[in-house]
Image: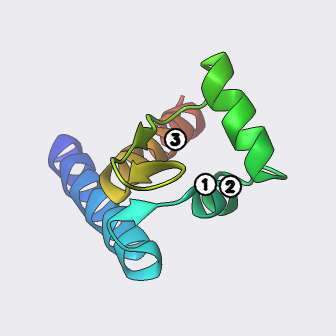
Amino acid sequence: MTGNFMRQRKLIIEYTSKQMIMQKYGPLLSLEEIRDVLKYKTEEAVKKAYYKGTLPIKLVKIEGRAGLFCSAQAMADYIDQVDKEGTENVMA
């Protein structure tokens, strides 16, 4: 019973995270939007973390567009991972 509840909770969280991000930012997030979601102080801090390899999400360059981006799915996956780790720590 508990396993089923946790699977349902995971599906709800994953759906909610992606839908919320898609509604607010669309399918791609710019550096400014990534900064906003991940609470970095500046876009330069996001870039620095990316180039150092410490940014927790994958960024991509898009041909014909300036800057770096991440998908709403990648951001939702990261948020879900953080939520899962937080839940496991509380339950431990």
- Residue behind mark 2: 35
Disc with the residue nearer the chain's start (2 vs 3):
2
Residue at the location (32% across, 73% down)? 19
Residues at discs 1 and 2 in contact (Cβ within 8 Å): yes
- Across and down, in percent, residue 34 comes to 59, 55
Residue at the location (47% across, 79% down)? 24
Where disc 2 sits, the SS reads helix
Can you say whether 87 is above or below 75 in the image?
Answer: above
Q: Nearer the viewer, mark 1 or mark 2?
A: 1
The part of the image, by quadrant, that contains residue 86 is top right
Which numbered disc covers residue 31? 1
Check disc 1: other Cα within 10 Å, few if <14, some if 14-19, many if 20+.
many
- Residue behind mark 3: 82
Disc with the residue nearer the chain's start (3 vs 1):
1
- Across and down, in percent, residue 16 comes to 34, 69
- Between residue 81 and residue 39, name the one nearer to us: 39
The residue under label 2 is which amino acid type?
Arg
- Across and down, in percent, residue 64 comes to 36, 54
The part of the image, by quadrant, that contains residue 28 is bottom left
- Across and down, in percent, residue 92 comes to 54, 28
Where disc 3 sits, the SS reads helix
Give the CA separation, mark 1 to mark 2: 6 Å
Q: Nearer the viewer, mark 2 or mark 3?
A: 2
The residue under label 1 is which amino acid type?
Leu
Where disc 1 sits, the SS reads helix
